[in-house]
Image: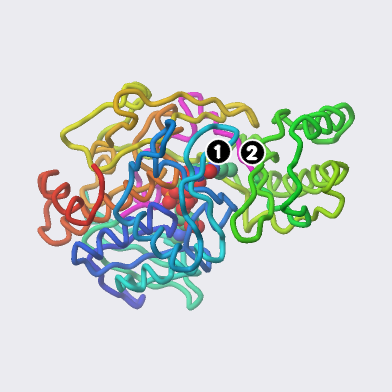
Amino acid sequence: MSHLETTYYDVVVCGGGAGGVGAAIGAAKAGAKVCLVEKYGFLGGAATTSQVLAYCGLYQQGKDPIQAVAGVAEELLTELRALGLSADPHCSETTGNWIVMLDTELLKLALDRLLRKYQVDIHLHTRCAAVSRTGKDIEAVTLAGMEGRSRVVADAFVDASGDANLAMLTGVDYQIGNREHKLQALTMPLRIGGVNPSVKIDRANLQKAIGDYNINGQFPIARTDGGILIRLPLSRDLWWMLVDLPLDDLTSRSFTTAEMNGREMAHAYLAMLKQLPGCEQAYLVSTGPQVGVRETRHPESRYTITRDDILEGAEREDSVARAAWPIELHAEAGKPVYHSIGGRGFAQVPYDSLRAKGVDNLWYAGRVIGADDQAYGSVRVMGTAFATGQAAGVAAADFADRHHVSDVSSVQRQLLAQGAML
Ligand SMILES: Cc1cc2nc3c(=O)[nH]c(=O)nc-3n(C[C@H](O)[C@H](O)[C@H](O)COP(=O)(O)OP(=O)(O)OC[C@H]3O[C@@H](n4cnc5c(N)ncnc54)[C@H](O)[C@@H]3O)c2cc1C
């Protein structure tokens, strides 16, 4: 190991999605020297890797949008607006929830600019590939990049990989999927061009076309309501969620089957769409670099947020973030079920749900945080991921500074100073 080139940081963040971006900037603003590692050639996580082109969880459910997440997410929206995206809350026609619609290319650029502004050392095309430990701490991460392997030593680490890769490499126990090890369905969001913005897709027509397709079609469509279908900003392309795929396990073979079947389904469903008036010239702009993955590993944390915490809108003294998205479950492919949040319309996220069990210098961000299978349906969304990421980053920087885990009040003070909402 020692022959590898070694660099030193205060905080290393694994993953450049909403959770990782929140963590890297939160840590950098707290004064840490930060390294962010991302396996793709751009930041954004599911938004840019899988065309998940809407931020959920930034606002509470209700008649009017009430903000639930600020801080880093707010700074990103400001960058996006400077690039010409409205980034205003939009009420989803199908769910009635408030979302912020995105544009992939503007998002990539806005994220680059924001991270550069805070002098985060970004390693794209690089994976966290191995971990070395000393007792209860992580000592270093081995990175696999274009130039081969290198070693990064740091005081504190944040797992924002979505898949809990860092926790897994560290040896933290984890559960795959829910208690029965069943995983939420994959979805391949489609981007459809060639449908004039003046054309309003008639849902009744679409549902009839789906009914007809389902009689003999090779890939029966579960979302018989037509799925989520929204115009994207700028391009006015259609953003369509109709391709749902079950996932049996986390093997590469299962993902390969899903990716290839997903593409077959995308083209078959496009052919069906083209039969609708005004859609004759429709074409598939993109299926995204990879299929959308909702759920993989849940590593052990020091607190597990429960379904009741979310449904009651639990308020807590050790809160470091707000979860405002209703519980959204995808147990059956294509049949999402929603449960609203009680109380004041958000649940407070406890600090210990961000802390790895049994490892003192590892924090969780985004969809890696400790939550049971139902609470996970709320806390995983990207708006909330920015908030839990920022909290994990601040806590990691605080640890790097003091070399011990300080009282949550120190983390809360710094988060408030950074404009976060607790
Ligand atoms: C089909 C679908 C629809 C969804 N709809 C919405 C929606 O409309 N709005 C919403 O807010 N949320 C939605 N979600 C949920 C949301 O996208 C995710 O839960 C969210 O992206 C989690 O953010 P994250 O930062 O934790 O993880 P991710 O966005 O998954 O980011 C993790 C990053 O880590 C990187 N990474 C992983 N392993 C390594 C490694 N070893 N080394 C280096 N880098 C690594 C990955 O490449 C990735 O960029 C949806 C999810 C799916 C699948």
Q: Is residue 144 visible?
A: no
Residue ID for mark 1: 92
**Residue 192's spot in the image, x, y percent?**
73, 53
Residue 152 among those drawn in magenta: no
Quadrant in the picture for residue 22: bottom left
**Residue 408's spot in the image, x, y percent?**
14, 43
Residue ID for mark 2: 228
Q: Quadrant of the C terminus?
A: top left
Q: Is 128 located above or below residue 305 in the figure?
A: below
Which stretch did the figure color magenta?
158-187
Q: Secondary structure at mark 1?
A: loop
* Amino acid type at mark 2: Ile
Q: How many marks?
A: 2
* Amino acid type at mark 1: Ser
Position of 300 with respect to 176 (left or right) is: left
Q: Residue at x 22, y 56 (%)?
A: 418
Residue 182 among those drawn in magenta: yes
Q: Is mark 2 within 8 Å of ligand 1?
A: yes
State the residue in front, 205 or 123. Answer: 205
Q: Name which of mark 2 and mark 1 comes first in the sequence.
A: 1
Q: Residue at x 79, y 31 (%)?
A: 220
The 10 Å Cα crowd at callout 1, few under 14, some 14 to 19, many 20 or more, is some
